Image: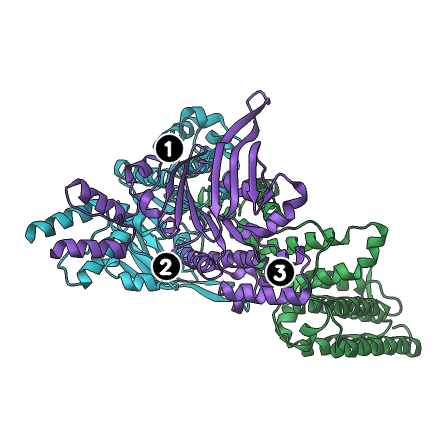
Chain colours: A purple, B cyan, C green
Amino acid sequence: MNIIEFNNVDFSYVSEDENEKEIRIPVLKNLNLNIEKGSFTAILGHNGSGKSTIAKLTNGILVPDKGSVVVEGMSTSDEDKIFDIRAKVGMVFQNPDNQIVSSIVEEDVAFGCENLGIPPEECRKRVDDALETVGMSEFALKSPSKLSGGQKQRVAVAGIIAMKPDCIVLDEPTAMLDPSGRREVIQTIMRLNKEEGITIVLITHYMDEAVKADRVIIFDGGEIKLDGTPKQVFAESDKVKALGLDIPQSTQLVEMMKKDGFSCDDVILDAGECADYLENMLRS
Amino acid sequence: MSQIVCENLKYLYSVGTPFESVAIDDVNISIEKGEIVGVIGHTGSGKSTLIQHLNALLEPYSGKVFLNGKDVWENKSEIRSVRFAVGLCFQYPEYQIFEETVFKEISFGPKQMGLDEKEIEERVYESADFVGINKELMNKSPFDLSGGQKRRVAIASVIAMRPEVLVLDEPCAGLDPAGRERILSLIKSYQQKMGNTVILVSHSMEDVAKLAQKVIVMNKGRVAFQSSVSEVFSHARELKEMGLNVPQITEVFLKLKKRGIDCRTDIYTVEDAYNEIKRLKSLS
Amino acid sequence: MISDITIGQYFPGNSPIHKMDARVKIVLTFAVIITIFLCRNFASLALVTFSIFGFVALSKIKIKTVLKGIKPLIFIIAVTAFINLFYGTGEPVAEFWIFKITKNGIMNAVFLAVRIISLVVASSLLTYTTTPTALTYAIERLLKPLTYLKVDVHTFAMTMTIALRFIPTLVEEVEKITAAQKSRGADMESGNLIKRVKALVPVLIPLFVSSFRRANELAYAMECRCYRGGEGRTKMKQLKMKTGDYFSIFVVVLMIAGVILLNIFIGKI
């Protein structure tokens, strides 16, 4: 079953040219995209490829010029449904500082719940559970300004899951974090997907994050260029590179060796797989 | 004689308040002229505090910083000359861009040095050329540039001061792979052409491995390692415990070694790896 | 440094004062401040000051920390007291040129100094022991009757919450921008006033630009979390008055009564 459906979506930004005349800059052209319920999808693309626009279209922050975006049967163009949609599809942004509202962690996590009009006792329970899920319970009474980037981002995620959404869209949530912060956030969202069954749409340009998804979609110029499992997508390494993206080093190495006549029937994505393959090859 | 020497450097935050804490302690480093040095460490490791001592933005609580054998704090009235000699460019260009045009933005530093107009213009065009900013962009507002362009303008504005030492704080953070590649290659060509010392602060081991000869690893306010790239990356386990990563390909070879394959472990790039595998294969 | 100012800061704790209902704390703080102004003699002022420091002791906040909060104001206190020194009436104790210092003047000066210190301590105790969010929420609740006058109390409180939330972020940002501009040779420490004000431009412009961007992104993020104003909104943390609150109200009422009695019986200094 699909949780989000993009049906023939056109989208363009309105801007001004040098003579201050209104012009439209097309971003998406006739896009069709379905996100399956419970899946973990990674969306890749270089800056300006239209991937952030996708995020904003999923919960009605932006609405399509043509076509429709449908979330659990509700169209984002239907203004009466907009808050129902936003309660279903939570969103986490790049800069953790610019999405935290309150100066106390637990009060920030409660913000979304309170907006939904959830009774206080129920709010309390959801907030405690959400903080527990992201592993931030001990920081409940701390000020967000004293937290690391990874911790802030987990607080932002907790604020979303307290609203009990079916889907979370994360727009480059790790771009401003250091390696340990990135690990924290990715592990958290993978757990949400596997254990809580929340649908995840992760927009990123880190390949090592994308390979953890069930499905990888690569965007360029507002169109889907590649779409499939990580192995299917990274098997086309030349194409991925041509789109201005990285290939994991392990994948690159094995690709080079294949061109040299070595055989490998699998697509190698991480260090463990690569070491296994090389060990086998060297010992045979 | 080393170009930059830090001796028993110690710095405290919020001295005399209940929030007093040690930022860095017992830091002893030396940097030779013409080296590319990587400084790595996760957020809060003290790496930012350290580099702000190199250009005398922060005054040590105790210990000394020497530039070309001279104590930088010996003559406080000349402290700005240290900042012209050690050019520090911060992570986010948003923290410094303020002028109406790109030209004015890049000329900010040279202007502060009190140079005459002809000299300023020469330096602006020279450094813009270094970072690949076209002449057509010179009269545009720097706020209208893309993220990658802004960052290159910020770097140009520091290079325009013709510093002996260029310190770059996370020059690639948040950029997509193509943008990252571009910044790294321009740093390399700058260093080769000018022969100046470059200090690259990063938490990306891949980036550091590509450029640096020497690496300083900061952890909990102290220098954990200070050595050649290969020596430092051989401590993969310790680095991971510090919240850092070694390049994926290095990890592959460390795994192989552990499994009893007699391979080199100073492998940081896919090319190195490819050659090593070929060598191993030819032996067997 | 900006970060050294302690007035308005919150010191986490678990004392009876920390646990009090923020609404009660606000009302009582106002009551105490007004009482300070009602004091006409040393006896009544001593009573109020004594009560304030009693509350400080209960809050378990170190006296040292509290006195530190007064430090930035010492200059103002000294100047005010000094001026008052010359406005006394009666027999001069010392005299030079057109100035004369009387016993009454000295008393006035001391009285005023104690008064200002009590005032600062009382109001900082409120912020030291109450989280900014609890404060804003309490203000929102206290001002609720104004909603009937079409005053948008919720928006006001939300603005306050966000402002408080972003103060540390902006302070940090100012430090970063200043560091970045100093690295490019900006000179912010020397020169006359005009030069120094001019030197602020490279700091203020990036700060404004970034604040606008933050505001924009925050608005997006709030909309994504279904924010649509105060209507239909609940609040996780409910304010409830407990024994400690009733006890404090009782103490303050007693104190006010004491001050009034002392004012009547002892009279003006």
Q: Report the chain holding disc 1.
A: B
Q: Earlier in the sequence, mark 1 or mark 2?
A: 2
Which of label 1 and label 2 is nearer to you? 1
Residue C210 visible at all: no
Query: CB under 8 Å between callouts 3 and 1?
Result: no
Q: Which residue is mark 2?
A: B64
Q: Secondary structure at mark 2?
A: strand
Which residue is found at the position 80% from the left and 78% from the top?
Answer: C251
Residue count near mark 2 (Cα–Cα under 10 Å), binned few <14, some 14–19, many ≥20:
many
Which quadrant does the C terminus of chain C fall into?
bottom right
Q: Residues within 10 Å of mark 1 (few under 14, many from 20)?
A: many
**Looking at the image, is B193 positioned above or below residue C100?**
above
Q: How many marks?
A: 3
Give coordinates of residue B90: x percent, y percent: 43, 46
Residue A17 is left or right of residue C45, and the answer is left
Tell which of C108 and B247 is nearer to you. B247
- Percent across and percent down for residue B4 are 31, 52
Quarter containing the N terminus of chain C: bottom right
The outermost residue toward the right is C264
- Whether pointer 1 and pointer 2 mark residues with C-beta atoms closer than 8 Å, the reply is no
Q: Which residue is mark 1?
A: B127
Disc 1 residue type (three-letter): Ser
Position of B15 with respect to A209 (left or right) is right
Q: Tell me the tag on residue A110.
A: 3
User: Which chain's residue wears label 3?
Assistant: A
Dot 3: element: helix
Please state which of the two labelled residues, at mark 3 or mark 1, is closer to the viewer.
3
Please say if B46 is above or below A8.
Answer: below
Tag 2 subunit: B
Considering the numbered disc 1 on the image, is that residue within a helix, a strand or a loop?
helix
The kind of residue on which mark 3 rests is Ala
Query: CA–CA distance between discs 1 and 2?
Result: 32 Å
